[in-house]
Image (cartoon, rainbow, N blue to C red):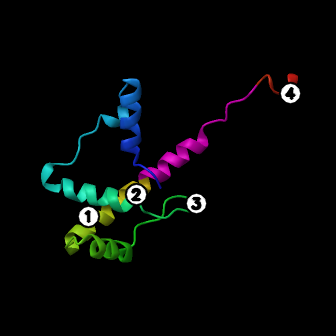
């Protein structure tokens, strides 16, 4: 599905020198940063149709097996909670995007 929103925003900041307000958020504490990185790795491979698909337990299990990570039930729960938060935020973002009026072209058709 491409780079995460944060990666995209960091790229914009690097190219323009302007830091978007969305980047003004704290990163997780060091002791749980690995969970955030795991979530990002899983999220980049998620399916999509009419929006992002939720992560499944079987996808997490396959990912853990293929990467060699030993993931506890509590860590899986955190990954699923992060996914729930991501899906809620993405749904809100899409709803806001759909409410914005399309730019009109007053000069279209010679009028």
Q: Quadrant of residue 55?
A: bottom left
For label 1, the residue is 78
Residue of label 2: 44
In the image, which is nearer the foreground, mark 4 or mark 2? 2
Answer whether labels 4 and 1 touch (C-beta < 8 Å): no
Residue 41 position, x and y percent, is 33, 59
Mark 4 or 1, nearer chain start: 1
Q: Nearer the viewer, mark 1 or mark 2?
A: 2
Instruction: Look at the numbered disc 4 and give the secondary structure of its residue.
Output: helix
| 3D distance between C-alphas at marks 3 and 1 | 25 Å
Compared to residue 7, the image places residue 62 above or below, namely: below
Q: Return the x and y of residue 48 as percentages of the image width and height.
A: 52, 62
Write the start and end of the magenta stretch as one range: 89-105
Q: Residues within 10 Å of mark 4 (few under 14, many from 20)?
A: few
Q: Indicate which disc residue 23 carries.
A: none
What type of secondary structure mainly makes up the magenta span? helix
Q: What residue is shown with label 4?
A: 109
Which mark's residue is nearer the viewer, 2 or 3?
2
Mark 3 nearby-residue class (10 Å; few <14, some 14–19, many ≥20) = few
């Amino acid at each position: 599905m491409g780079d995460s929103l944060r990666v995209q925003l960091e790229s914009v900041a690097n190219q323009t020198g302007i830091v978007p307000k969305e980047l003004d958020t704290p990163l997780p504490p060091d002791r749980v940063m690995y969970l955030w990185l795991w979530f990002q790795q899983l999220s980049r491979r998620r399916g999509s149709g009419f929006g992002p698909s939720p992560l499944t337990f079987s996808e997490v299990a396959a990912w853990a097996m293929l990467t060699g990570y030993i993931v506890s039930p509590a860590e899986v729960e955190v990954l699923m909670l992060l996914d729930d938060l991501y899906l809620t935020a993405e749904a809100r973002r899409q709803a806001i995007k759909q409410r914005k009026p399309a730019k009109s072209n007053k000069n279209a058709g010679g009028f």
